[in-house]
Amino acid sequence: MRLLDSTRLVSRALLTARLRSFLTILGIAVGIAAVSLLTTIGAGLQLYVLENFSQFGSRIIAVNPGKTQTSGIGALLSSTRPLSVEDAQSLRPLPFVELVVPVVQGSGAIEFGRRVRHTDIIGGNGEMAAAWRFEVAQGRFLPVISGNSQPFAVLGSKVKQELFGEASALGRFIRVGGERYRVIGVMAAKGQMLGFDLDDIVYIPIDRALALFNRSGLMEIDITYRAGTSAQQMAERIRQRLIQRHTVEDFTITTQDEMLSSLDRILGLLTVAIGALGGISLLVGAIGIVTIMVTTVQERTAEIGLLRALGATRRQILLLFLGEALLLAIAGGLFGLLLMSVLLGVLAIAVPSLPISLSPFYLLLALALAALVGLLAGVSPAWRAASLNPVDALQQE
Amino acid sequence: MIRLQALCKAYALGDETVTALDEVSLDIGAGEYLSVMGPSGSGKSTLLNMIGLLDTPDTGRYQLCGHDMTILNEEGRAAERNRRIGFVFQAYHLIDRLSARENIELPLVLAGMAPAERRPLVDEVIERLGLLDRAGHLPRQLSGGQRQRVAIARAVIRKPALLLADEPTGNLDSHSGAEVIKLLEELNSQGITLLVVTHDPAIGQRAGRRLRMEDGRVTEDSGAVNTPRETGYARR
Amino acid sequence: MRAADLLQFNLRLLLRQRFRTLMSLLAMAVGVAAVLLLTGLGEGARQFVLNEFSLLGNDVLIMLPGRKETTGGIPPLTGEGTRDITLDDVQALGQLPSVRRIAPLIVGNAQTHVGGRSRELLTLGTSALFFDLRDLGVRQGRMLPDIPLDRAASVCVLGAGARQELFAQQPALGQWLRIGDRRFRVIGILDDRGESLGMDMRNTILIPVASAQQIFNTRGMFRVFVQHQPGSSLERARQDILALMQERHGGEKDVTLITQDALLGAFDDVLRLLTLGVAAIAAISLLVAGILIMNITLISVSQRTREIGLLKALGASANTVRILFISEALQLALLGSLLGAITGYSLLALGHWFFPLLPFVVSSWALGAAWAIAILTATLFAWLPASRAAAMAPVLALHGQAR
């Protein structure tokens, strides 16, 4: 039988039972729409989160004190062997190192005149803005110095707004934890990252912050490095240098590369898992195809007998019914994608901030999935049809 | 018992309109035995369906047991069919997944009768129609004659006033056909009004009153002969 | 028609179309089982988290140094304020009438040595009351001694995991170990308990708070746990504490108080939402099952056209015919849901058996919702085919024509 002829036979059969075919297609379509919609949203969120993290650049390595990373709070804890500013300085001579930023974070009252704002205080150095890719809107960032620092402070845009309003803050004196600081810069607005307001921060020199919080150790050292070396090699060099100073490895090194890729892995896994949940609907849709195909074979037993009597081979019968299942499934897949794009459109209008990325790869995958479902669901009924005895089949009414 | 006045019915068949009944008027007394003959498409089945309340006339009036049937809606007609009318079809129309007994019981089930009430009624009919050893069989385990016998049992289980048979012997060999006709006549002699539509003149001739239809009209009517007897069936 | 007759009539039908029935049941069951399984898992995870965190007790406040203006955001968890919470502060708070118990906490990573072994372990400097507050028990020996807060003592209590790490099979009780440059004697081993409040209690060492101050060379507390007096309200205790701290810190409001409810509320909401979302995704499969049931009812109607005609001739009203088909679908849905519920809960029970940490939760709302959706979809989707059957003209139906 020629492909065109068999296609015509199959589509005629499907059209005759129009409502039945439509419902079967609808079942698959809902499943495919669920899977593709969920994976699309998942992939979009994945991209969004990754972009959020990679805004710090990818050639950055963080060192935190403590080896046992207890649910991420290790850095906050006191330690018998704190990471010191000297530790940070010792990393500077390492090859490829670009910027080294010691970090400590706490909170306290910021006063200007009679206005008070309690907010986050970050202790850093002059290289922090460059390393974190934060931009200064007015004035300048903390100066790059060696030795004791001067009482300079840089304000996040929100803190500036709260304390000074529209008035200029540059050159004014504020109190941070009771000590006098001169405002030398205001940062550009940065927005939120994962619930953390990046604009509600005051930056002061690291030595002053340590004194302010009465801390001996840093919470983190951030190192950026030049291109030409790998994250692993760079991390290894830092590890060696710090072990030299501490004799044991009592710190944890996280490369941005590593973090991004593990984040990417986790989010990817999550996307697949959610897609699989949607796949349950697809499974039910497949059950639908099996049911309908078996019923169709039952109803058309006499027709199958006739076709066999007219000289159709088992193979042809098999392909005919398999083709019918396949066509149903692919139509379901296409319809499902249509359904998905409508839902995505509605979603995009309702939640404009939702990051959506349509990848043709996933769409094709969804279609292939639908076809696979059709094939798998169609095999058994088609086989049943093909193995009917023509004489018995003809007698069936 | 039955009074038809100027019944008309037309069907659309493709682009054409076919007149199935053309101003048919007819009076049928209780306990009468009628046969309706005529060529295909003469309107005999339509007449039967009309009397059996399966179909509704376009115009005209239909009274059954003194009640106007044309004012009933589908729900009302269904209730009347269940109560007053029994059908026997050429194709038996037995439900093949139900046993003979369950098929017979069906009108009672539809009427919402309790099992305890149904049992004696079904037992009685099964015995009267000689189906005792067949009651538990499925339709496909029965011969054609036995199937029609089950269908007749089902038709009379509610003791209807009217029994309508549309080619009851059409699918049967002559021997079984004769038995079925005998059974129907026996029921008629017990007082039920019997109306048989048939092609077979041998069967048609047996009726006390014979109608002939052509082109939607009753062209011959031999007239009522047997006087209605007051029996258990006719009183209902 | 009586309900019992209807049921029997339908059962006959479903048994006859065995394969079709089986597949519809399967479809329904998969959907219901998925919904129940996922909500069960979600609820289980939620309760697990809540249980874990509520060990703190409803009457406990956590105080941390530092304060941020932004409300609703993350509290200043770094624990670094411009002014320390000192042991004097803790002692003063303990005198408040609305405070029942108070326990300071300093946490740090410290190198711990026993003989040749050396491990970096989470070291908690605290007081005897901490054990009551956190509901910690000892498996062996005793808890930290009830000594004045500002007195150091060379004793420690080990978590079960830390004990294993440091002493392996050797007896630990009464032995000496070194934390940083100080020596401590092991006086107790904690009950084997998992992670709580983000700290793995199994791998910790507990020492008196004053000793921890010396080891870590720090003055300020990382956290302070306060349990309020049963007679007074939590809010009252909160006000009292804040007022006293402000007074002691020269009029500065520079501490943050967190209640368990506030902490768990957000968690609870997120997990509840997640459970709901996941269940909703699974419920899509019930929609697909509904479509299948509609299709099957449609096929049933078209295959049984003559039967519909007969039933009508025998006096079945349009309503009876409609009920006949809808009840058939409904029976399928109910049976399928039952099957799904059994499967879902069996899987959950199995999961609980394999992972006893995960509580076995039968969320009645999910069961109710799954059944309601199953019944609703079946009725809804069977309505169209059933109405089709109900509207058939008896004469045509008898001849196998739908219209």
Image (cartoon, coloured by chain):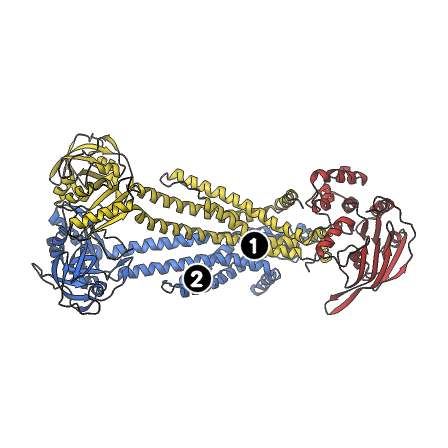
Chain colours: A blue, B red, C yellow
Nearest the viewer among B62 and B36 is: B62
In the image: residue A357, left or right of residue A213: right
- Depicted A376 relative to depicted C178: above or below: below
Compared to A5, does C107 lie above or below?
A: above
Task: Please name the amino acid that badge 1 sits on.
Answer: Leu
Which dot marks residue C35? none
Residue C30 appears in the rendering: no
Q: Nearer the viewer, residue C218 or B35?
A: C218
Query: Chain for mark 1?
Result: C
> For the residue labelled by badge 1, is the local secondary structure a helix, a strand or a loop?
helix
Q: Estimate the x, y position of residue A97 in percent, counting from the top left.
A: 15, 60
Residue C380: mark: 1
Image location of residue C207, percent across then percent down: 17, 38
Query: Which residue in the structure is indicated by mark 2?
Result: A364
Report if residue C314 is visible in the image. Answer: yes
Q: Nearer the viewer, mark 2 or mark 1?
A: 1
Position in image of residue B99 (x %, y %): 71, 42
The amino acid type, in three-letter code, at marker 2 is Leu
Q: Quadrant of residue C91?
A: top left
Which residue occupies 59% across, 64% down? A8
Total marks shown come to 2
Q: Residues within 10 Å of mark 1 (few under 14, many from 20)?
A: some
Q: Quadrant of residue B50?
A: bottom right
